[in-house]
Amino acid sequence: MNSSPIDLTQFVKTYDVRGLVGTQLTSEVVAALAAGFVDEIGAAGSDVVVGHDMRDSSPEFAAAFARGAQARGANVVSIGLCSTDETYFASGSLNAPAAMFTASHNPATYNGIKFSRAGAQGISLNTGLAAIRDRAAAFLADGIENVATAGSFRETDVLAEYAAYLRKLVDLRGIRPIRVVVDAGNGMGGLTVPAVLSTAAGLDALPIEIIPMYFDLDGTFPNHEANPLEPANIVDLQKAVVEHGADLGLAFDGDADRCFVVDELGNPVTPSAVAAIVALREITRVRALEPDLDIIVLHNLITSLIVPETIEAAGATAIRTNVGHSLIKDQMKATGAIFGGEHSAHYYFRDFWGADNGMLAAMHLLAEFGHQDAPLSEFAAQYDPYFLSGEINSTVTDVPAAYDRIVTAYSNVGEFDELDGLTVTGTDEPFWWFNVRPSNTEPLLRLNVEAGTRKKMEEVRDAVLALIRE
């Protein structure tokens, strides 16, 4: 029992658990969360998948989770070291709930848990995570009571099955030879890339030459943070692509569920461009298999206009969503969408149980690129015709006042939309829009701007930032 209660609300976040090792996340806390998870989803007597990344604390936490889950009657299926999308594969293929120990791209001092219901369905605060948290708090206060029949424990390795499944979804055998530099950031891509894109899992060789960077699994991240969203963390990859004369570069985050792309010149290819390319491929693929299906593709409201334009031009229906991992998973299921893309390089696939998979997105890109002859900079340019600011964060003490200033300034020149934060779309030419969203966890406003010309994007960006920071 816990003599000094830990406030779980500090690190049980909107979509997952993410906290400091030792002060917030301890083995005792993890065991309580496991017990709460099993009780909340009714998993006693059923399998629960547990996987973990390469962080130093992850094996210990996975073991603590197994103890807590077994105490409440769940049969733990340990898949050991894995990427987050491997746990989704296990959850989907075994139709079992899952817990993945990772803090994704966060520094080494953090760890966390990503929960899934059976079939890789997401769990957020609104769909069970708050209840798991509250049950865990009770277990911390009173102790975890063992049920009459404790759960079992077994180990299994799903990497080969995972790799084979992805190879069935995207056939890369017929592409032209491609040289790819891959920066795994000492994260789980160091395990999954050789299995999926090479021969480490016993699959046939592909016409892809992999030049590895930082493939050693090391949760201290000795080379750079495993967060490719930060420009500083892809500098090494950009240099290596040019030095090796590679066709492109791929960078994975710590748990390898997000993938970022750079072209042969070392320039980033936007996640929106990748989303448009993958959307087009999935529309074409599914239409050939299911010609009578009304095809729906999701995109969050921060992606470039090129994404819905590409979807609609291909004869499918584009649906805008809020930003948010578990929310988009829920929307994938509710709408029957075949694919979903986010500006943050999360890509969701109906045929991967609606879950996100950066490796699968990378494979689609390699396939499309490898069936034509232009360099990636030229090929990707058609999917990146507009000008994006990227996400700009501003510390704001009075968010409503900042909103009021924006509404006053743009009431006569823009159309307003409050799907997620505030989106203002210009009524003049060249086209422009911006979105301002408050952070869930910090006193921040996040600004994204897009326009038909660089000059217009910069003009709108600077004007809105001045209002936000006034």
Image (tube, rainbow, N blue to C red):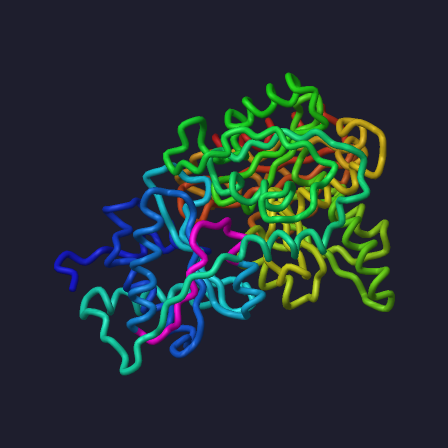
Q: Give how far across and how far down residue 411 sits, in percent.
A: 65, 43
Is 374 left, or right, of 3 in this rendering? right
Is 51 left, or right, of 352 in this rendering? left
User: What residue lies at 64% left-to-right and 62% top-to-bottom?
Assistant: 332
Q: In this view, does 262 lie above or below 74?
A: above
Q: Give how far across and how far down residue 99 sits, in percent.
A: 43, 60
Q: Nearer the viewer, residue 242 or 459?
A: 242
**Is residue 77 found inside the magenta-colored segment of the image?**
yes
- Using the rendered image of the protein, determine whether residue 414 is visible from the camera's viewpoint: no
Q: Is residue 130 above or below residue 349?
A: below
User: What residue lies at 58% left-to-right and 41% top-to-bottom?
Assistant: 193
How many numbered marks are there? 0
Is 86 left, or right, of 55 in this rendering? right
Q: What stretch is highlighted in magenta?
A: 72-87
- Using the rendered image of the protein, determine whether residue 149 is visible from the camera's viewpoint: yes
Residue farthest bottom in this picture: 148
User: What residue lies at 41% left-to-right and 77% top-to-bottom?
Assistant: 42
Q: Nearer the viewer, residue 241 or 282?
A: 241
Q: Which of 108 and 246 is in front in this view?
A: 246
User: What residue lies at 58% left-to-right and 53% top-to-bottom?
Assistant: 160
Q: Give how far across and how far down residue 20 sits, in percent.
A: 30, 44
Q: Give how far across and how far down residue 109 sits, in percent.
A: 32, 39
Indicate the quadrant where residue 14 lies.
bottom left
